[in-house]
Image (cartoon, rainbow, N blue to C red):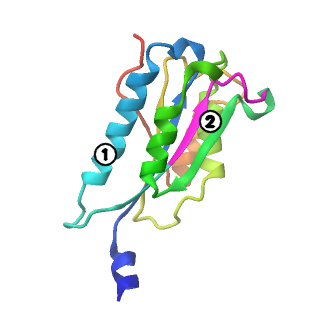
Amino acid sequence: HASDAKSDQPVVQIAILLDNSGSMSGLIAQAKTQLWNIVNEFISARQDGKAPRVQVALFAYGLNNAPGNSGYIHQLSPLTDDLDKLSEQLFSISQKDAGSEEYCGWVIRDAVEKLEWDNSPKTYKAIFIAGNEAFTQGPVNYVDSCRDAIRRGVFREMLSRKFGG
């Protein structure tokens, strides 16, 4: 049965959180490319010889056109397996809406709470956040957001280096 095969297929769910503040000027292209390379690693991965079904969500934060009561954050895509469309959305992010408030804790919390994460413990769930500012900005403590993510089975991953230094 096709449904049996699909239920046997590994699932990967990834939320990409991209700092689009003014301080990312000159770094945004590199950050987008690195984030998309991460997605491609999962696309080409195999578990017991099977390719995973990869779903990716996209958030931009540090935006001046998003209201402060939303943490200067915009969810550009829910979890989707339409990766061509998601790639277009990621690479179309521009600095025209760049702001100056980078609320990492808030955007992590939004990703944890607003996305429809799979409940299966077999599903690999991760949040990748890329930016160049301290995690301590804003009214939502990133430690609390990360603890909540882990409690819900979502693992927080960060790029190994901070962009811009």
Residue 47: % across, % down: 25, 63
Q: Is residue 74 above or below residue 4?
A: above
Q: Is residue 105 above or below residue 101?
A: below
Which amino acid type is shown beneath numbered disc 1?
Asn
Neighbour class for label 2 at 10 Å: few (<14), some, many (≥20)? many
Which amino acid type is shown beneath numbered disc 2?
Val
Q: Residue at x 53, y 17 (%)?
A: 133
- Mark 2 to mark 1 CA distance (whole Å): 23 Å
- Give the numbered dot on residue 40: 1
Q: Which residue matches tag 2?
A: 107
SS class of the residue under badge 2? helix
In the rendered structure, the answer to whether residue 39 lies left or right of residue 68 reads: left
| Residue segment shown in magenta | 57-67
Q: Nearer the viewer, residue 112 or 74?
A: 74
If the image is split into quadrants, where does the N terminus sit? bottom left
Residue 28 seen from this side = yes
Q: Residue at x 35, y 27 (%)?
A: 160
Residue 68: % across, % down: 78, 27
Foreground disc of the pair 2, 1: 1
Q: Residue at x 65, y 22 (%)?
A: 97
Mark 2 in CB contact with mark 1 (< 8 angstroms):
no
Where residue 35 sits, quadrant-wise, is top left
